[in-house]
């Protein structure tokens, strides 16, 4: 991020949305709405004095709403650009017409309550779509108890809990009673490979469950982990080795079998009912915490964006591509890379990004003339 | 040899030039240091006494100016630094603020603005390294900040002006390997205007794909796809194709590689794309191959007759060896299918490999005459003790072929015995579902009780029912993993780029830099890096082309002069320890009138310091991080603030 943020050839328009695209390959005009942050981007240096004084709280989306942020906030500490934003919907001044405390404390005079959305017209030769993913909300799968059983959380919520900069400072305090979770179950394919929700495989769930379990053990040598999986899909470089390392060095228990139901005992402990398909047995185990590897889906509003760009999506709303031209969308001059093309891991996304950049370069940049020698 | 001379001259020229740089100091000039202590709003000043640190800095030797700023990085802060340099005739600047990663370029630029060589700037981190980690004790944080500033000043006193190292880039590329990855990469670079030399060991371009029948998930003909790509490459005026050739020597560094390409004799030809050398088993294999049509096993035999793809070889240079310069190198040497000798009764006749099946499908030889009972066994030689890794593509390849058999023989019984089905993503899972709908049966097995193949029967413990199943089979098809081509070792040694424990090439960073090597100017794509589908290989090939085209487009590379240098030539014995340990191929041992000596290729050096640490004669120094500078910092710390 920092490299992109500092690169002289990259203008970052964060907090912005494409509203329309006209023209053709080599000469597009994109209308971009740059939403008002009510903070001058070129002045603010994200020192955070404003947030320290802001009286209004709102759930922190980056921390999966596990804690609150202020109405003026930085999306996350390493965010690029490092500029504060006022959340208009939660700001006392926008709500009641007075406060402006942030303006008073800002020594750089970066607050601008009069700021309006800007409409930019960009002339570009090529467009690259890299809108990534959103995760599936497992609430409709009531048998897993998410939303009803406090100690059933999603993989992303777990990421914030185990993160040193997260709401618990990296301690695995479970939601119900803030006790340190020692026995953790990781349930795979929640909404993935499921005809009712996402028919496809999320590609990353198996690996991040293993990573999560390793992290739990690194934080606490007494941590006990069970991963309930169907096929363990470890196809990337050294992933198989990682799975073995998880078992041998981190004591991960891998159980082949989809979980049927999660129940809760009187102490708030989730009990996992499952069939061990290797042993033909229906069993249950009680844990401190259950982590759901929720399905990964194309970013919300992908179909809206596809209409604006005039590109085709496939039935799951991933970008439609040909396997032999894996970054070309249906519209010449528009390329796509990363998870919006379908589930992939980081190195794949990086390769695709390079590929999309190269296709754009072939289109947009003049051929380099190499002098004959 | 001429490129070495150039570098030498370059370096000498720079040294001469740097003396004349404005703001450079001679040994006799008085050292005048300015220190700037940033408050970073409250990020620093909230947790330590920045004013006290600034006042303390004034008392340090050679410091003639000190000031604290609310934000040193702000417009006002930067202007303040520039003015102070001019007004106080500062010839060293120390900023104590955040991390060099964020603002070092900014402060260096400020020094240059004010006429000071930017390497006379020293960054001290009192935020991440101090205020943020000692929030609970202002006294300790302030003391530590003083220590850090004192150390920074000590180093700054000994800083020397430096110039960036620049070298021209020969605007042409060498692509090693003429499979789908190499072809894609070569085409992409050629389209951008660069001359590309494409080297392929085989007589034909196309790599492993040309032995396949159809590609999943699009179901297009693999050989037609490969042939079309090869044709496009052949027609491109900027691509020179060297088939039946190998790179036999590479010297140099980014921008100036001198490569030698030599024809390969029949003895070595074939080792790159072949699934294996002749063994007793491939003799049997050849029999089934004759039924199967062209597979890599018999391609060698057929070559005399069938130079179809490279028939006229587009006026390619013949003979050789050819020697030429190129700016960048892309490794696309591919992989081959393991011959599954010793796994599940492989005999090449009734128990065959998926690649053999591909050949049979291609020849239209899969029909009811083969029988109607097929069993596929996955992980034949993969995910086992001797080969731990998962080969990524075999599950889908098996499912694709099972569906093709089912199309050819609709009432065929096909059982696929698998451990974990790797149908990652959207289309793979969809194919798996379709295969099940078509009636392909999938039976899970665990490595503790693997299937046993004997006398036309496959016995397997089905864990779902907890009982052994017996499957009659007319043909058993094994899915062995892809393994790196045998040439990988040679290429690795020649280019000084590493292989992993499985002999796949090791990229610069497994997550963030999948198509780069740690060595600048050399890139990796396709199955030489790890098993990949055609689509994935194409992405990697274009990604590698994209990275390779950066230095080619610029026409030069610039590196920071933080490099290793031969500090004490007399001491150097030319033992080669430094060259062996250099991860970037930046050191060579050359013969000089004084005996063998280490020679440093500045543009290839990343300044990691491994060589200096390795050298037992202490003949190597790191410029800009000299022993003197670092010792001064340590001494300043030990001395305390008295």
Image (cartoon, coloured by chain):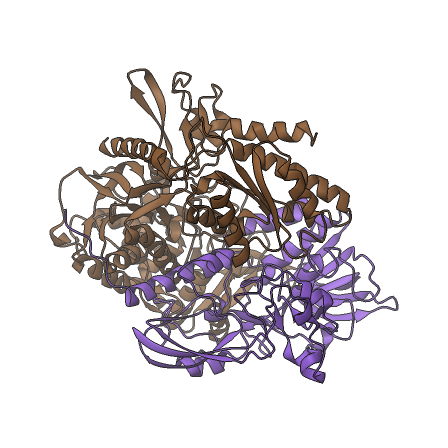
Q: From the viewer's perspective, tell me whether residue A114 is left or right of residue A335.
A: right
Number of marks in picture: 0
Residue A35 position within the rendered picture, expressed as x and y whole percent measured from the top left: 53, 77
Would residue B366 be seen by someone viewing this image from the given angle? no
- Chain drawn purple in the picture: A
Residue B248 position within the rendered picture, expressed as x and y whole percent measured from the top left: 26, 36
Would residue B161 be seen by someone viewing this image from the given angle? yes
Question: For this rendering, which residue is in front, B274 or B642?
Answer: B642
Q: Which corner quadrant of the image does residue B374 belong to? A: bottom left
Of all residues shown, which one is farthest toward the right? A266
Question: For this rendering, which residue is in front, A213 or B300?
Answer: A213
Of all residues shown, which one is farthest toward the front? B87
Q: Which corner quadrant of the image does residue A65 belong to? A: bottom right
Identified at 78% across, 62% down, the residue is: A174
Chain B hue? Answer: brown
Question: For this rendering, which residue is in front, A286 or B131?
Answer: B131
Q: From the viewer's perspective, tell me whether residue B306 is left or right of residue B471.
A: left
Q: From the viewer's perspective, tell me whether residue A141 is left or right of residue A178.
A: left
Q: From the viewer's perspective, tell me whether residue A300 is left or right of residue B530.
A: right
Residue B418 position within the rendered picture, expressed as x and y whole percent measured from the top left: 53, 59
In this picture, is B338 found above or below B628? below
The quadrant in which the N terminus of chain B is found is: top left
Question: For this rendering, which residue is in front, B190 or B550?
Answer: B550
The quadrant in which the C terminus of chain B is found is: top right
In this picture, is B294 found above or below B157? below
Residue A82 position within the rendered picture, expressed as x and y whole percent measured from the top left: 57, 62
């Amino acid at each position: 991020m920092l490299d992109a943020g500092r690169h002289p050839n990259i203008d970052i328009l964060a907090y912005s949305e494409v509203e329309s695209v006209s023209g053709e390959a080599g000469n597009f005009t994109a209308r971009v709405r740059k939403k008002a942050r009510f903070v001058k981007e070129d002045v603010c240096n994200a020192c955070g004095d404003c947030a320290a004084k802001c009286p209004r709280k709102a759930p922190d989306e980056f921390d999966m709403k596990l804690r609150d942020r202020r109405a003026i906030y930085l999306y996350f500490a390493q965010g690029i650009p490092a500029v504060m934003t006022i959340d208009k919907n939660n700001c006392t001044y926008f709500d009641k017409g007075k406060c402006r405390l942030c303006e008073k404390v800002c020594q750089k005079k970066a607050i601008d309550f009069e700021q309006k959305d800007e409409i930019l017209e960009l002339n570009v030769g090529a467009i690259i779509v890299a809108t990534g993913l959103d995760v599936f909300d497992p609430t409709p799968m009531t048998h897993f108890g998410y939303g009803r059983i406090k100690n059933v959380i999603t993989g992303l919520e777990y990421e914030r809990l185990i993160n040193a900069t997260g709401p618990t400072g990296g301690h695995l305090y479970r939601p119900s009673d803030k006790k340190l979770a020692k026995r953790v179950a990781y349930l795979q394919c929640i909404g993935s490979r499921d005809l009712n929700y996402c028919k496809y495989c999320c590609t990353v769930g198996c690996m991040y469950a293993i990573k999560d379990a390793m992290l739990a053990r690194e934080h606490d040598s007494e941590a006990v982990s069970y991963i309930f999986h169907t096929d363990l899909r470890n196809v990337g470089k050294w992933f198989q080795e990682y799975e073995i390392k998880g078992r041998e060095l981190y004591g991960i228990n891998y159980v082949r079998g989809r979980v049927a139901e999660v129940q809760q005992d009187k102490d708030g402990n989730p009990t996992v009912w499952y069939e061990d398909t290797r042993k033909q047995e229906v069993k249950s185990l009680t844990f401190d915490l259950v982590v759901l590897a929720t399905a990964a889906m194309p970013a919300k509003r992908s179909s809206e964006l596809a209409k604006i760009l005039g590109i085709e999506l496939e039935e799951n709303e991933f970008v439609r591509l040909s396997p032999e031209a894996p970054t070309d969308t249906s519209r010449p001059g528009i390329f796509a890379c990363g998870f919006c093309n379908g589930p992939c891991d980081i190195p794949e996304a990086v390769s695709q990004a390079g590929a999309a950049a190269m296709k754009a370069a072939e289109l947009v940049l003049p051929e380099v003339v190499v002098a004959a020698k | 040899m001429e490129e070495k001379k150039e570098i030498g001259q370059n370096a000498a020229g720079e040294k001469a030039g740097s003396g004349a740089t404005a703001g450079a100091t001679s040994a006799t000039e008085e050292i005048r240091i300015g220190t700037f202590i940033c408050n970073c709003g409250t990020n620093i000043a909230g947790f330590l006494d920045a004013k006290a640190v600034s006042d303390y800095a004034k008392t340090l030797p050679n410091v003639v100016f000190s000031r604290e700023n609310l934000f040193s990085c702000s417009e006002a802060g930067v202007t303040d630094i520039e003015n102070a340099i001019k007004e106080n005739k500062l010839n060293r600047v120390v900023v104590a603020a955040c991390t060099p990663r964020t603002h070092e370029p900014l402060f260096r630029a400020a020094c240059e603005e004010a006429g000071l060589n930017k390497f006379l700037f020293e960054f001290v981190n009192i935020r991440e390294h101090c205020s943020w980690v000692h929030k609970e004790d202002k006294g300790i944080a302030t003391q530590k900040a003083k220590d850090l500033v004192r150390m920074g000043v000590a180093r700054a006193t000994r800083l020397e002006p430096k110039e960036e190292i620049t070298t021209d880039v020969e605007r042409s590329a060498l692509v090693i390997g003429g499979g789908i990855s190499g072809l894609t990469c070569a085409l992409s670079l050629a389209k951008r205007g660069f001359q590309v030399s494409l080297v392929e060991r085989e007589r034909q371009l196309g790599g492993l794909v040309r032995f396949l029948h159809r590609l999943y998930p699009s179901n297009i003909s693999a050989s037609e796809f490969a042939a079309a790509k090869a044709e496009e490459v052949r027609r491109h005026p900027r691509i020179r194709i060297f088939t039946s050739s190998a790179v036999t020597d590479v010297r140099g560094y980014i921008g100036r590689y001198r490569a030698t390409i030599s024809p390969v004799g029949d003895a070595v030809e074939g080792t790159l794309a072949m699934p294996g050398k002749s063994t007793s088993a491939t003799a049997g294999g050849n029999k089934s191959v004759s039924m199967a049509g062209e597979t890599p096993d018999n391609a060698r035999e057929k070559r005399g007759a069938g130079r179809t793809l490279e028939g006229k070889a587009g006026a390619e240079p013949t003979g050789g060896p050819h020697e030429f310069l190129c700016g960048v190198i892309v490794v696309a040497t591919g992989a081959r299918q393991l011959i599954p000798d010793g796994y599940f009764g492989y005999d090449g006749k009734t128990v065959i490999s998926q690649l053999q099946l591909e050949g049979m499908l291609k020849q239209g030889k899969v029909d009811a005459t083969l029988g109607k009972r097929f069993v596929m066994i996955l992980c034949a030689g993969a995910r086992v003790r001797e080969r731990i890794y998962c080969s990524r593509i075999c599950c889908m390849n098996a499912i694709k072929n099972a569906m093709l058999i089912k199309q050819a023989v609709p009432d065929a019984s096909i059982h696929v015995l698998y451990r974990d089905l790797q149908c990652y993503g959207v289309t793979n899972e969809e194919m798996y579902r379709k295969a099940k709908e078509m009636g392909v049966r999938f039976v899970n097995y665990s490595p503790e009780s693997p299937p046993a193949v004997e006398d036309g029967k496959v016995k397997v413990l089905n864990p779902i029912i907890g009982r052994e199943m017996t499957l009659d089979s007319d043909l058993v098809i094994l899915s062995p993993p892809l393994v790196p081509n045998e040439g990988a070792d040679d290429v690795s040694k020649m280019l000084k780029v590493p292989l992993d424990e499985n002999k796949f090439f090791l990229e610069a960073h497994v997550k963030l830099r999948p198509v780069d090597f740690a060595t600048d100017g050399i890139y990796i794509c396709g199955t030489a890096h790890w098993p990949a589908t055609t689509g994935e290989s194409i992405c990697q090939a274009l990604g590698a082309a994209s990275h390779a085209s950066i230095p080619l487009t610029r026409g030069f590379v610039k590196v920071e002069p933080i490099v290793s240098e031969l500090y004490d030539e007399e001491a150097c014995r030319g033992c080669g320890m430094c060259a062996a340990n250099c991860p970037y191929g930046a050191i060579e041992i050359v013969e000089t009138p004084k005996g063998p000596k280490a020679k440093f290729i500045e543009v290839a050096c990343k300044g990691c310091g491994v060589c200096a640490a390795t050298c037992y004669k202490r003949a190597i120094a790191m410029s800009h991080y000299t022993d003197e500078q670092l010792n001064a910092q340590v001494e300043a710390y030990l001395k305390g603030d008295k």
